[in-house]
Image (spheres, helix red, strand yellow):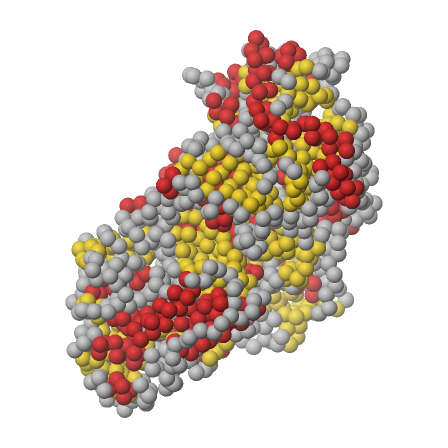
Amino acid sequence: MSAPERRSRFGGASLPARGGAAQGDAVTIAECPATLIQVTARKGRQDALAAATLKELALALPAPGASALAGDCSALWLQPGGWLIQAPANDGNALVRRLAAALDGIAAVVDQSHGRCVLRLSGQQARAVLAKLCRLDLHPRSFAVGASATTLVGHVACTMRLVDETPAFDLIVGASYATWLLEELVEAADAFGWQLTRAGAAQPA
Amino acid sequence: MHLIPCPCCGPRAEDEFHYRGDATVKRPAPDAGEQAFYDFVYTRANPRGWHVEWWHHYAGCRQWVKVERNTMTHEIRTAVGPAEDIPEVQV
Amino acid sequence: MPARPEPIADRYSAWRLLKEGLGGNKGWKPAWRKPEPKPHYDVIIVGGGGHGLATAHYLASVHGITNVAVIEKGPIGLGNGGRNTTIVRSNYGLPSNTRFYEWSLKLWEGLEQDLNYNVMMSQRGVVNLFHTDAQRDVAVRRGNSMRLQGVDAELLDRDGVARIAPFLALDNPLFPVYGGLLQARGGTARHDAVIWGFARAADRRGVDIIEHCEVTGIRREGGRVTGVETTRGFIGAGKVGVAVAGNTTRLADMAGLRLPVETHLLQAFVTEAIKPLIDCVVTFGVGHFYISQSDKGGLVFGGDLDGYNSYSQRGNLPLVEHLMAAGVSMIPAFSRLRVLRQWAGVMDMTMDSSPFICKTPIDGLYFNGGWCYGGFKATPGSGWCFAHTIAKDEPHAFNADLTIERFREGRLIDERGAGPNPWAQ
Amino acid sequence: MSGRRLPAGGHIDRERHLSFSFDGRRFFGHPGDTLASALIANGVRLVGRSFKYHRPRGIMTAGPDEPSALVELREGARTEPNSKMTEVALYEGLVARSQNRWPSLGLDLMAVNSLAGKLIGAGFYYKTFMWPKAFWEKVYEPLIRRAAGLGRAVDRRDPDHYEALHAHCDVLVVGSGAAGLAAARAAGASGARVILCERDDLLGGGLLLDPAHDAWRRQTIAALEAMPEVEILPRTNVFGYYDHNLLGAIEHAGDHLAEPAPHQVRQRYRTFRATEVVLATGASERLIAFPGNDKPGVMMAGAALAYIHRFGVAPGERAVIFTNNDSAYATAHALADAQFDRIVLADSRAASACADDVKARGIDVRFGVEVAHYGGDRVTLRARNGASDRIPADLLCVSGGWNPNVHLASQSGARLRWHEQIASFVPGEPVQAERSAGAARGVFGPGNAARDGAEAGAAAAIAAGFKPGAAFALPDADRPETPLEPLWEVRAQGKAFVDLQNDVTTEDIRLAHREGFSHIEHAKRYTTHNMATDQGKLGGLVGAAVLAEARGEPLEKVGLPTFRPYTSPVTIGALAGRAIGEHFQPVRRTSLHDWHLRHGAAMQPSGAWLRPFYYPKPGEDIWDAIFREARAVRGSVGICDVSTLGKIDLQGPDAATFLDRLYANAFSTLAIGKARYGLMLREDGIAFDDGTTARLGPEHFLLTCTTANAGPVLEHMEFYAQTVWPDLDVQFSSVTDQWAQMAVAGPRSRLTLQKVVAGLDLSNEAFPFMAVGEATIAGIPVRVFRISFSGELAYEVAAPSGDGETVWEAIIAAGEEFGIAPYGLEAMGLMRIEKGHAAGPELNGQTTAADLGMGRMVKKAGDVVGRVLGARPALANPSRPRLVGIRPTDPAKRLRGGAHLVSEPGAGKSLGWVSSVTQSIELSQWIGLAMLEDGAARQGQLLHAVSPLHGESVEVIVTSPHHIDPENARVRA
């Protein structure tokens, strides 16, 4: 299996490449295939998990509301004892196997690479688009670069991360909701103009 | 739209949660008998005023958050994690 | 049908209307007196809402018990009797409910004559929509259960729904309308008038309606009730019936009873008045939305509970957003109308969504409660059955199953199978 | 014809002309006009009819308080009933019609109601229409309903769009009058994030009515616009104050246009989550009740001022001003500016400090007089000594004082407090983080209000954690006022209104009191006072005062009815936003969705999912397709997308213990590489969910649950893991979307899979029923489960969802030689009923394990969810309805889901109900599953399945629920 060949979850949405006001590009929505691995510490093994991920991936597991970066990998806090590791798409199974071995007895390792989709929403109006779909305060004073949160966007649960000050947001959503979320984003961006791209692998900023 | 102070995620809008009722009733030991289970499932103090209750953060950290909220005013005083107890408040 | 009531003094008639109208309407008497409490009554009803007043009326008119007081902590009828969506129906699927609600509906059908008060009972039909084969089968099961018990029900196909509710978007993309279950005898009544009509009728038979008198305790001696402590002093009573929606737990606490009840919020809404658009009551169950149009022209609508314990009568926005979206999805004409007012009532939700009208372990103390959001339509039936239970010290067949013990015994009356989760009922 | 456009003044664009029509007549106005101001400018006076008596009505106000000037606005699908002309911004081509009149506004025959006024006072309906009984439904009610309502709704889809927008701020300021502007500036200067909402399209509130204050207004707005963290939202009405400092508002983004611009919304529903709120909502002028106070020509004094200074129109030529306070003196000056022919100022008080300035302009000021009657052209003035005077006037301006707009403060939970000096209610102690400022708390005059606002804005910013910013210039201090003297009603002959839209008179209030409806809420409900679309803003307090007088009690004791949302009626479409139609709720799609679409599947919503119900071929009807698909499975092989099943990955040392407690049956005994059916109960003993669970390793399980319960089951597991047994070391997460799952079913399913599966021996010996293994298909790693829902030899294959289509297509290619058919939910349902598997209709929240024939599975001891309460006497009663099969004795007869089972056709007692029905392809007749009392004992009995709704009764024989293969041989083949 090679991840980049897998099919886009945008398929259900028969959307043009660009649309909205002036067919503009006020925001860009990109589908970013990635390897996603959910790790959940066994009871009382959080420290061991943190040490192991630091050793394996050089990633310091972040606190709630934060994310961490190391090379082309990142980690997002999901829940007490639980994180989502994001890595380039082509690493796929090898990384899952490597982590499962390294974390044996320390954490449950579950491949979510196909279970969730990463959509990157970027552009000057990205915050304005999200304000229509999400009740979280995304003002830079409240949600700075690197901040992450799992919240509702367009009525579905998404894990969100502010990647850079473009601003660019990564929205990680259950794969079966990807088309729905894309349509919600496009509708919300209609007044600004939007374009869709399928970026290769998501590169953490 | 309540603002629920999730102990993990911070203040979040109510629609990220499912309300799940009285958090003061404790599931009895398996051999505690029918009356004990009856009270756990059915009997409710249903207070006017401060109420300790479950809010499941389904669209966030997926924790069963224990929230102390006033049923007359909807004011929220405390929220703690699922296995913690609400601290006593001196009134 | 109820025993034919004695004619009450001070009757409304066409002749009197004309006479009073020409005389500047100076001759009308108060619809109910404002008496001081007596030291002792045969029966005290706690709660001056629809159910309490109806109980007093039927105690007097059916059972001849007139030494009765209805005690209300505020003015009468400002609880759920005055803050509901006025729907009247008996389209329940479980026989324990159907039996009771059908008797209530029969009483509604003769209420104007019984009370000499126009409560504007309007039987324009109640239709429950369904959108899948599985939902249809559930509706058919319920409708057939009603029919087997002699209650009217009709199954409408899509065209049938279109005929009686042409304003619906039948081709709704997520909820295409397959058909509906119609109870033609269902409809609406003017909620405040029901309160006032029962109050006036009970008053004219000698019942004392005592407003601004809050019960603070239930006095007992040797396992028997002897009266109630109130903010206006102790009032003795042979029997005490409690019908206090929204306060059931508090009164139960006074009597040392513990109930399977949680109190929740239910919001309701009315639009600006418009010319007739919606003739019947329509419920869009899977979208959690129902609607009717009042005789004054406002569209009256509501939906689910706000979903958390509350006594506040303060509704919140999540429910509002969902409800308006459901309404516009199903009724396109709804979009450009304006909602004028919103209010919220507090519902005593039981753990199986059905009420209780029953005796308690304390002699002479009776409880009526747990109406969830079905209390308005139950008003006459509840009063009638409660009066019977109090007068005879045993339930009537209509309310025999509506006990509190049923939860302990596992005889649940759970229409929707939602389980002991009031927020999901 | 008395109104006219003034030669100068007003915030209108005189260069441009807009044409519009009212009741078919064409008029012109200017940008900046409202429909009301433009009609006044064109001399139109009669604009509407009242609800009950159909009395002629004119324009009373210049804003949202308007009770009378309601129109049907726009045309076609954009028709909008009951719009207040005083709030409708004029645009080119505007079309409006008057309402509630027949045949026309000028000649309304329904006005005969007015003659019957003596009879149809408050409470009239409750006393009548009862004789004879049958007439209510047939005669009276239809008449009442026909007379009901004001404008018409148009049964068309709304062509406009709406959206929601959620904002957060440190300080929210509601209202942009002197207090609001100053509050926003003070808060903004601190660096706080500030949002300033103004319902009007221009900022300034009362400042717009005095040219002397325009410089400060403009300068303050400019300062605010220069602050990057201040957002200004005109045309935005805050409609409600909710819990935890959340406020809701509607931004009228496109209502001032003929049509919203492309890609723009008509209205935007906004929420504001504010740390602190400043309510600078101003005040509303109140009416005085006197006979004829509803006639066209009566206008609030503040509105007349607004028409002159804001819109540059004069609403008449000869005016009387009737007041009990100083504010109307500004109107007198404005009327003089507008060169009225004659102005009489009738002040009910003995004196006013403002009088000299007014007199100096030639205005006839009279003290100690009241208006005893207005006939539409003449005002009857009555002095204290009884002397009266009739003065011709086409305009009667009224001011009974000002009521602070306390709606939002009251909604926030603050109690109201009586303010003696202004004879009105003001907000009391705040409950939430809010404060009122300016006229909203009885601080009147631009100078006073601005000072009050600046203090409130600074205090709010400090409370939100900011340091106060630099001071700024404020308007000059106001001159001291002569106090108001309360005047609610002038008692004289004729109808005096307290609610103009619902036609409630002072006599109605007194009648209500006589009949015992003396509590303010009773009086409101009995008379309908305050319940119209203006929500009693003009006359609410006046009615309460009349009631107070009747009761002989002070007004503050009588109080006002509760303030509830909405401060002003709100368009429903705006609150619905985009979440309508197909956007009503999230839709889930499996990874095979596109394949289904490409292959002509009939997709239908199933809970949140879109799923293929069947795959019709040309010429096939539904049943043809279902039968063909089911026959393919029973006869050869079929494939079905079952990706929607909930899948939960469970790991940890205590995983098996956890499952033992969670399920009614045991899992710790399950071998690695095997799957087992499990039944989950609710704690009350009722069946909750079922599915198969596979053991992938010693501490690793994969649970499946029903599509509908995937969410609830995960939540249920989290409850027990987090709160009940936090000591158990388990980790679990949903992997529903990670895996595409496909059922490959039928006698040739093994042959099919053997062609494509690599790395797994699928022979019956190596891979028996309930085996689980790993393999690859088309190079993609998959999991294979030998489980069956159809009752045939069957497998389920799980592939990573991104590769689902590749695997699916590989299997179809392999099955081609066997005639493999994709099958949908319908065929699956048919086969599960044949097989007798319980599903949603049977697991309906009312049935126990025993009811479903699974009583023996339930563990009798130990810690098992639902075990204890499931043993309650009535639930354990063996005569409860049990799952059975039924078949018509006449194979030609059909069955109905929802039919009831009775002993003989006429019997009324239901013994049970039919839960699921289908046409069996194996038995070639209708079959069903039913829940039947004493079901086990009744096997072989003849009963009747009756559906009175269909007028049908069918004799049926009771059978085992397993209509086919009761020995379960096929699945093991």
Instruction: Name the residue located 68 percent from the left edge and 23 percent from the top edge.
Output: D783
Q: Is residue C275 left or right of residue C110?
A: left
Q: In this view, does D78 lie to the left or right of D42?
A: right
Instruction: Name the residue located 20 percent from the left edge and 55 percent from the top edge.
Output: D19
Above or below — where is D827 with respect to A149?
above
Above or below — where is D838 with respect to C389?
above
Occupied quadrant, residue D927: top right
Q: How many labels does the image show?
A: 0
Location of the C terminus of chain D (image quadrant):
top right
Occupied quadrant, residue D793: top right
Would residue D321 be seen by someone viewing this image from the given angle? yes
D802 or A32, which lies in front? A32
The x and y percentages for residue D280 are 44, 69
The residue positioned farthest toward the top in the image shown:
D817
Would residue D581 be seen by someone viewing this image from the given angle? no
D553 or D91, which lies in front? D91
Q: Is residue C386 left or right of residue D156?
A: right
Above or below — where is A53 with respect to D927?
below
The x and y percentages for residue A14 are 44, 31
Location of the N terminus of chain D (image quadrant):
bottom left
The x and y percentages for residue D162 are 41, 48
Instruction: Name the residue located 49 percent from the left edge and 67 percent from the top edge.
Output: D189
Above or below — where is D271 with respect to D429?
above
The residue positioned farthest toward the front in the image shown:
A71
Instruction: Name the residue located 61 percent from the left edge and 71 percent from the top edge.
Output: C214
The x and y percentages for residue D520 are 46, 71
